[in-house]
């Protein structure tokens, strides 16, 4: 005896009623993932005109284009900021003031775009100078995922510092899905930041990263003990990386008290759980290398994988 | 002498004829990747109304919305299930019965959605409790990639157990592309499963994962020997992880006989190829730390990367 | 006092004027990321008819479909090739010859599609034979990310060898975003190449990879010293991997002089910085395993994460 669509519907509605998990108008509304993905892409178009557009931008039309785009972003971002403020209102703000607050916070954020462009300019320099495979700064903007990932983090960081909930994290998750790099909006990142390849690199909420830091794919700047879970909210749980540090692929650096001194190099696939002084070189213990005998060769080398 | 488009076409058609690799109506049809991506997104909308939609859902319209969505999914999923059953028919089923079979299997699958929601409820609890950066359960649903990745695996696992070929794997690959996490539909995953950051985490077909298991990005639960290749199909090739185990970033656990005992912790970047008892702590050998001399400092630290 | 949209616009325009970063018609135009993503998808449709389409392909219509698709790709790719040649023109070519050059280079590229299909045929064999979870070659094409990732690299490699700037890298970045695997267009990759899971795997510009090489997620074939940055352009900076080598998850192999001898196996999470002879087995030093005492058990295992 097979269920009918009506029966299936009733079961699902019962499940919604008991277990929740609906984003609807009766309760508080969350910002829309979809709206924020469109807004974020428009912000990237404002940061790098012509790079994220279907068409190129004539300098004759750049002003008109910019006004139109700014007005679009202002309107839609203000709506999402309003929803997120309504979702968790700042203390001592009356509900009727939230719309004005959303408007002023959004304008304040958009006013920061030129500063963000200045920071991104240093990141693009670092990428170009750091990678012999890069032909030009334009190629870096058009073809390096780190530009998009870092740009979105720097945008989200402004909203994060402004106390806007949810939206910054939704923005960086959008970039995480596109670049494979998970930079938390809370991280404090200096100038000339370059992450090559990006995939799998994770930077936690309370990281402090200095200037001229270079990292590769799969690097984790993560928390040590998550035992206390929610109790640790707000504490510094992620490492501090000083200026001119290089961190190679797959290295994991753990803990809020961990400080990697300036000009240090962390080798690939090592795990670092305590501070190291400046100019440190940290490398993995040598691997065991053996040559397989004729006999063992008869087995597939793959069988020796450990 | 440059080739004409006609010549290019003839060469390609010759290549199709000789090497194959066409998904066409003359042979068996494979399910459509595109159709399955739309179906999977609709299933996520059924699991979390309003979170994956353009618009929010009013409780007044939730019933109408749910009926409509269920009917859409039933029709399109049934078509894809039919194609996959036709592609590799279960033994002893006549071709003319396949349409009915596709219908009943699809209804059976949709009837499981409330159970899947119950499981996902435990996963969301685990994510919220495990991550101090999480502000609320809603933020977890809207901004944590693991929810999407695990939801799709739990959906695909039901189809996998029901013997539907191809579709489960296409579903989890869709989620893999979006989240960076590759959870095979065959894996048997307990309650309260949390993977933070997700990117690069791989869980193999024959893994058994207990309850309250927490993992991070880049964790691999993989097969030991792939020498025998296809001969190993169906054998348990991937590890068993018992309850309350924590596995940190980049750890690789190898082999079908490997059992990680309950309440164990596997540190970052270690490779584990055999079983460990409960309450084990497995960590990487300490890295070599040296401070670069003034002389070596004159070289770039990067040159020491090893 | 809040800024007006006009003020915000003026600040942004000032920033564009000072810091640049606009892709517009007044200067050299870069190829369009969006156009190249559409072209790359069409090329995948030409390589595997029916697998990347909304609809299946009847053999009756395959010829018409192929002609139409080839004409579309020829026109749009020629435009992008023209832009990239205009952006950095080959020596001794007059501007007025660039259009003809773009046309002939594009035709030459499209003429290589059958050869690329032959190579991909060997890759699909390798994936099917190497993975017990694979049910059929069709499942490999429809559900394995490595097929898409490797196909795009093999396409981009032809353009790279033909001296087309920018486009090859934009193509492989498109695939990187979709598969998590970053295969540089410059890498010279042999037959029967299989990368399982793909996420986080990086192959550098000057890598040479032999035949029958099998790799897993998170493998890095990377450069040793990036100190000299741009000065190293053109030099061999990435490893050579000989035939029948297997490289497990998270292994990092470093340096342009590093040669991994044939039939070698590199274990998970090891870092290799020098050459190893054929039939080598390279594995990580054993991890430290301890069992937590009753007392320490009272703490959360997670606290011991290192």
Image: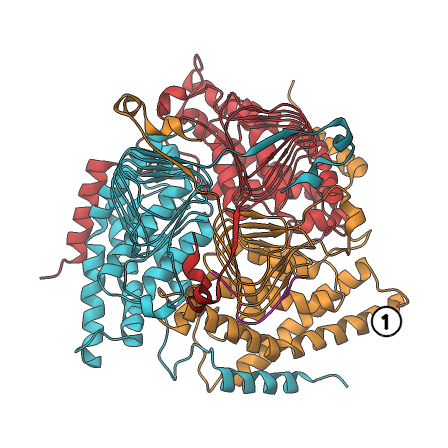
Chain colours: A red, B cyan, C orange
B269 up-or-down from A296: above or below: above
Residue reaching furthest to the left: A1
Magenta segment: C187-195
Q: Position of residue C81 (x, y in %)?
A: 73, 65
Q: Position of residue B231 (x, y in %)?
A: 33, 70
Q: For mark 1, give the secondary structure.
A: helix
Q: Residue at x 43, y 39 (%)?
A: C287
Residue reaching furthest to the top: A92
Q: Quadrant of the C terminus of chain C?
A: top left
Residue C189 included in the magenta stretch of the image:
yes
Instruction: Tell which subunit mark 1 falls on.
Output: C
To which residue does mark 1 refer?
Answer: C97
Image quadrant in which you'd find residue B211: top left
* Residue B31 appears in the figure: no
Q: Residues within 10 Å of mark 1 (few under 14, many from 20)?
A: few
A168 up-or-down from C205: above or below: above
Going by the image, does A10 lie left or right of A112?
A: left
Residue C212 or A9: which is nearer the viewer? C212
B39 up-or-down from A120: above or below: below
Residue B114 or C254: which is nearer the viewer? C254
Going by the image, does C89 lie left or right of A267?
A: right
Q: Residue at x 74, y 36 (%)?
A: B300
Q: Quadrant of the N terminus of chain C?
A: top right
Q: Position of residue C221 (x, y in %)?
A: 60, 53
Image quadrant in which you'd find residue B272: top left
Residue B52 included in the magenta stretch of the image:
no
Q: Position of residue C143 (x, y in %)?
A: 42, 64
Residue C245 or A50: which is nearer the viewer? C245
* Residue B113 appears in the figure: yes
Q: Residue at x 36, y 66 (%)?
A: C132
């Amino acid at each position: 005896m097979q269920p009918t669509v009506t029966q299936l519907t009733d079961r699902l509605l019962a499940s919604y009623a008991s277990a929740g998990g609906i984003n609807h108008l009766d309760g508080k509304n969350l910002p829309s993932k979809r709206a924020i993905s469109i807004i974020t892409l428009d912000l990237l178009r404002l940061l790098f005109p012509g790079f994220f557009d279907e068409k190129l931008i004539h300098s004759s039309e750049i002003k008109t284009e910019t006004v139109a785009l700014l007005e679009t972003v202002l309107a839609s971002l203000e709506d999402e900021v309003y929803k997120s403020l309504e979702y968790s209102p700042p203390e001592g703000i009356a509900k009727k003031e939230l719309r004005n607050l959303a408007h002023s916070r959004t304008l304040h954020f958009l006013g920061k775009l030129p500063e963000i462009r200045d920071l991104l300019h240093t990141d693009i320099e670092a990428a170009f100078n750091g990678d012999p495979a890069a032909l030009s700064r334009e190629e870096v903007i058009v073809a390096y995922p780190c530009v998009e990932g870092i740009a979105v983090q720097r945008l989200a960081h402004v909203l994060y510092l402004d106390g806007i909930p949810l939206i910054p994290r939704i923005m960086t998750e959008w970039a995480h899905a596109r670049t494979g790099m998970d930079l938390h909006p809370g991280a404090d990142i200096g100038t000339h930041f370059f992450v090559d390849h990006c995939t799998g690199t994770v930077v936690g909420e309370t990281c402090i990263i200095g200037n001229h830091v270079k990292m590769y794919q799969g690097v984790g700047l993560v928390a040590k003990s998550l035992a206390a879970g929610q109790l640790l909210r707000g504490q510094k749980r992620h490492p501090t990386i000083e200026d001119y540090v290089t961190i190679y692929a797959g290295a994991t650096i753990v803990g809020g008290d961990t400080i990697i001194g300036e000009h240090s190099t962390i080798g690939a696939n090592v795990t670092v759980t305590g501070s190291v002084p400046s100019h440190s070189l940290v490398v993995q213990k040598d691997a065991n290398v053996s040559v397989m005998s004729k006999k063992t060769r008869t087995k597939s080398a793959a069988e020796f994988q450990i």
